[in-house]
Each structure stands twice: as structure tokens, then as C-alpha cells.
Image: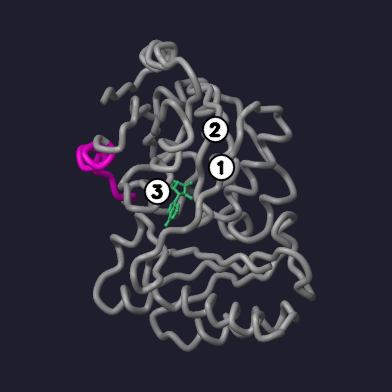
Amino acid sequence: MRTVTTLPELRTARLSLKGTVGLVPTMGYLHEGHLSLIRQARAECEHVVVSIFVNPTQFGPNEDLSKYPRDLERDLSLIEPLGVDFVWTPTAEVMYPTGYQTWVEVEAITRPLEGSMRPGHFKGVTTVVAKLFNGVQPHKAYFGQKDAQQQTVIRQMVRDLNFTLEVVVCPTVREADGLAMSSRNKYLEGENRQAALVLFHALSAAKDLYEKGEKSAEALRTKMKEIIEAEPHARMQYVSCADFDTLEELEQVKGKALLSMAVLIGKTRLIDNFILG
Ligand code: AMP
């Protein structure tokens, strides 16, 4: 399996692929969630490209860019058996050379939820994903439902900028006890690992309530809030019950809705979501 870094290396590697190409963009420190995306791409495309890049422009000044877990050797050994054609590992200098000044920004749907807590985050995400798409020219690109707003924002960008590729969204992969897999779970130690289950428990309780007939979005948000507030190691950033497509907060759940939340467990910021309807 080849690894390429520079744009000329990428172009040569890409030109050697004939037939459909699936791209799986990641920030590395891979887990089963990432591997499920690669397996799905493998099943649906003739060629698979994985990118590994911890994108500095999607981290805020007080976020965990320098501490974000990295282990390229381990990542490559996890990818190797999956039949990936090549891995693109650009450096920050390849992506953002001196004098860089072009950005991609999606408007309304980047404002609530993650956007409200992480100003500038989605501008970094959409810019880097557009650059990954332009570099790799995939027919399909694979994203996880774990990052619900991210996949919504990327689908919007693909429509708005006439990218001729299909965005494929794959289900969230969880640990046996329900915790959504995340590279940041590495930070969870001792009691915080158990406390992190509060996200899954709060989402499950709200979904149960909905399935028993509760259609008031406020009642579902309150249920999630109560469960998070009862966990001493958890600090809620937001809970939401929003329209699945517009991400606007709902009063009543009628069609497809997104239950989502961001919670600090100690210093580790976790997000999770369930789909209703
Ligand atoms: P990241 O490396 O965290 O930027 O994630 C790369 C891709 O993997 C994104 O599309 C994520 O949504 C997806 N992903 C991360 N965690 C999971 C998970 N637990 N299940 C499914 N997909 C995931």
C-alpha cells in the first residue's frame, strides 16, 4: 500500500486508478468507526483512497490541536489489510502553503449546534474537505453519522458547489456499552470512561420517550438535560432536538429529527446523536 504526501505524488497515484474511486477522509488515530467507512468504500468502489490529516484550520485557539492523538504507523497497519489503494498524508504546508488565502464557507446550517460552540470550525472543515475532493477527485466520499452536523454541512457544500460526487453517510459505530467510538475517547481515564456513557444514556432515554408517544421537542431536550446534569463528571454544552435537514430547533417532532449533544467529560469534549423518525 502506497503513502503519498505531496500534490505531484498524489496526482501520479490518482492517475494510476482506473474506475470508481471512494475517498475516506480522516484525521487519523483510527478506530472501528473509521474502518467501517473504509470497508463500505471497499465494497462499493473499485478503488479506495484514505486521507489522514489533522486539519489545523478546524481547531479553535483553545482547542486540542497540539494534543490531538496521532500514530501514523499504527493507522497504516490498521488500513493495510483492508485493500486500500493509497493513503494521502499531506502536511500542513502542502494544504496551506505560505500565502494561502481561499476559504469555503457554508452559511445557515453551520451556525447552530457545533457551530455555536466552535466558531470557525466548519469553515476549516469545508475548506479542507473541498481541497481533499479536488485533490483525489473521488466518485464517492464516506462520512460518519457520528458527526451529524458535519455530514449535513458537507452535503450542502457538495450541492452548492456542484461537486459531482456522492456523499455516503455510514452509521455510528459504538463500543459494546454504547459509547460512540472517537479518537478523543483515548483521553477518557478512570471514572471519566464510565461517566462518558451519559451521552448514550441521555439519547436512549429521549428516544424511548419519543417512541412512547412524546412528540414535544422541549420534553425530549429536558429529559436529556436532566440525565446529563445528574452525572457529576459531565458538563453539558448543548442538547438539541432539531429538524434533520435544516438543523433548526423543533417544537414538535413530526418528520425526521436529530437528537444531538455536546458534553464535556472532565476536559474531553464528546458529541453524539440519534436520528428519530
Ligand atoms: P475524524 O478522524 O474524527 O475526523 O473522523 C473521520 C470520519 O470518521 C468522519 O466522517 C467521522 O464522522 C467518521 N467517524 C468518526 N467516528 C465514527 C464512529 N464512531 N462511527 C462511524 N463513523 C465515525
- Local packing at callout 1 (Cα closer than 10 Å; few below 14, some 14-19, many 20+) is some
Question: Looking at the picture, does residue 242 appear above or below residue 56?
Answer: below
Instruction: State yes or no: discs 1 and 2 in contact (Cβ < 8 Å).
Output: yes
> Which residues are drawn in magenta?
68-79
Mark 3 = which residue? Answer: 36
From the top left corner, tell me how far across and down residue 26 is, in percent: 41, 41
Relative horizontal placement of residue 186, taking residue 266 as reference (left or right): left
Q: Is mark 3 within 8 Å of ligand 1?
A: yes
As for residue 69 lying within the magenta part, the answer is yes
Looking at the picture, which amino acid does disc 1 mark? Val
Figure check: 185 above or below 229 = above
| Residue at left offset 74%, top offset 55% | 246
At label 2, counting other C-alpha atoms closer than 10 Å, the crowd grade (few under 14, some 14-19, many 20 or more) is: many
Q: Nearer the viewer, residue 130 or 86?
A: 86
Residue 39 image offset from top left, x and y in percent: 39, 42
Q: CA distance from mark 1 to mark 2?
A: 7 Å
Q: Nearer the viewer, residue 12 or 27?
A: 12
Q: Which sits earlier in the primary sequence, circle 1 or circle 2?
A: 2
Residue beneath the point at 71% across and 63% down: 256
**Label 1's element?**
strand
Give me the disc on residue 168. Answer: 1
Task: State how many labels appear.
Answer: 3
Q: Quadrant of the C terminus?
A: bottom right
> Does residue 84 sit above or below 183 in this rendering?
above
Type of amino acid under label 2: Lys
Tell me which secondary structure the magenta stretch mostly adopts.
helix
* Distance (Cα) linking label 1 and label 3: 12 Å
Q: Dot 2 corresponds to which residue?
A: 140
- Pinpoint residue 162: horizontal percent, then vertical percent: 71, 27
Q: Is residue 269 left or right of residue 103?
A: left
